[in-house]
Image: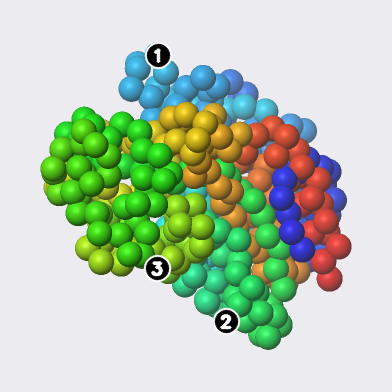
Amino acid sequence: MSIFSTGGRLTQLFIAVLMTGVVACSGSSSSGGAKLGDSCAQRDAFKIQKLESAYIRCEIVPGTSIHATEANQKAKFVWTETTEAQYLLASASNESIRIDGSSTVYPLTAVAAKYFETTTKSVMGSNGVKVTVGISGTGGGFEKFCKDETDISDASRAIKPAEAESCANAGIEYTEVIIANDGIAVVVNPKNTWAKCLTMDEMKKIWEPDSTVTKWSQVRDGFPDTPIKLFGAGTDSGTFDAFTEFVNGKAGVVRKEAVQTSEDDNVTVRGIQSETGALGYFGLSYAIENSTTVTAIQLDNGSGCIDPTKETVQVYTYPMARPLYIYVKNSSITTKPAVGAFVQFYVDNLKQISADALFVPLTDEQITTLQSELAKVVQLE
């Protein structure tokens, strides 16, 4: 089953999840003195409480951001009216959700996990849900997923036929969810003042398997003789697969000589910082997060130089834009109510989660499609 975008009646999923064990806490008020419009703290984001016949939740004030540097835009939080549906999701209890996979998707899922734990603990106390999120790369995540070691797999590419076959052989059925948009940012050292835009042909010249390029002057006339130092994602990373397919037309086909690789994007950041002629790549969200230490450059696929931005990634005009996924084990949804509740919470609150994790969110149209497709999960038995 595949979920690509959304927009539907989440109450159907609530009913399905509740029937398998989520507690619908519809008892007395637990507001603890908070009331609509009161200020709350960032650490309490997504806490939810019942206030007489209504429900309130600690939410960020629109127009403010936890990443803002301007004083008037810094994050503020208030108790805001929310829905019974979100309260029902928060009543998931006494379960652990296991997630592993892509290092690119990790920051997004980690934020979703933190907020979901907060919301369940605000209703269920010590019986709230525990969500663990690991980083073993997209390929490593699928390996664990198909061995029945995880409930959800983060992925920066679609599952490969061989991986799908491995899951099928193990009796693992799953639902694919496109959870965000992402671009692979090509980054250079801030002292690099010449390579402001590279064509995709130049990228291929540098990264193709038999490339002999060792200096920037070999990439384009007028570039300096500065040595090129290459940094890239490890071969178990979905970012590696996507990058190599974008650049060379086939996943996994890439130059291997004189390239330092790692599953940890921090290694690439440090490498770019240390070498004036360095060139590397990783997910756009990570480039934004590290914009003070590395410089993301433009790419040209024949239609002019395009900046890697939220807008160009959402409409796929940036040459290396892609969707990001989570894969949810169907049996986990049907036997562990908290898994279905977490996925629905993730989708329902995706815009804020994406903003807080510095990810390119789905468009309104994509979210509308995702919600309607998510309702199909109800049919799982």
Label 2, on which residue?
Answer: 147
Residue 95 image-quadrant placement: bottom right
Q: Nearer the viewer, mark 3 or mark 1?
A: 3
| 308, 63: nearer the viewer | 308
Is label 1 or label 2 in front? 2
Q: Nearer the viewer, residue 242 or 217?
A: 217
Q: Which residue is mark 3?
A: 235
Q: Earlier in the sequence, mark 3 or mark 2?
A: 2
| Place of residue 120 in the rendered image (x, y in percent of width and height, measured from the top left) | 59, 51
Label 1: state its secondary structure.
Answer: helix
Measure how far apart labels 1 and 2 are at the Cα level.
Answer: 49 Å
Whether residue 368 is visible here, answered yes or no, is: yes
User: Comparing marks 3 and 2, which lies closer to the viewer?
Assistant: 3
Residue 184, numbered label: none
Q: Of the residues under marks 1 and 2, which one precedes in the sequence?
A: 1
Question: Which residue is rendered at x = 64% and y = 73% of the image?
Answer: 161
Is there any visible trace of residue 44 in the rendered image?
A: no
Q: Are marks 3 and 2 in contact (CB under 8 Å)?
A: no
How crowded is the residue under tag 3: few (<14 C-alpha within 10 Å), some, or many (20+)? some
Q: Amino acid at mark 2?
A: Lys
Amino acid type at circle 1 is Asn
Residue 91 placement (x, y as % from top left): 67, 53
Examine the rendered structure and indicate whether residue 289 appears above or below residue 126: above
Q: CA distance from mark 3 to mark 1?
A: 43 Å
Q: Secondary structure at mark 2?
A: loop
- Looking at the rendered structure, the kind of residue marked 3 is Thr
Q: Which mark is residue 72?
A: 1
Q: Is 339 placed left or right of 189 in the picture?
A: right
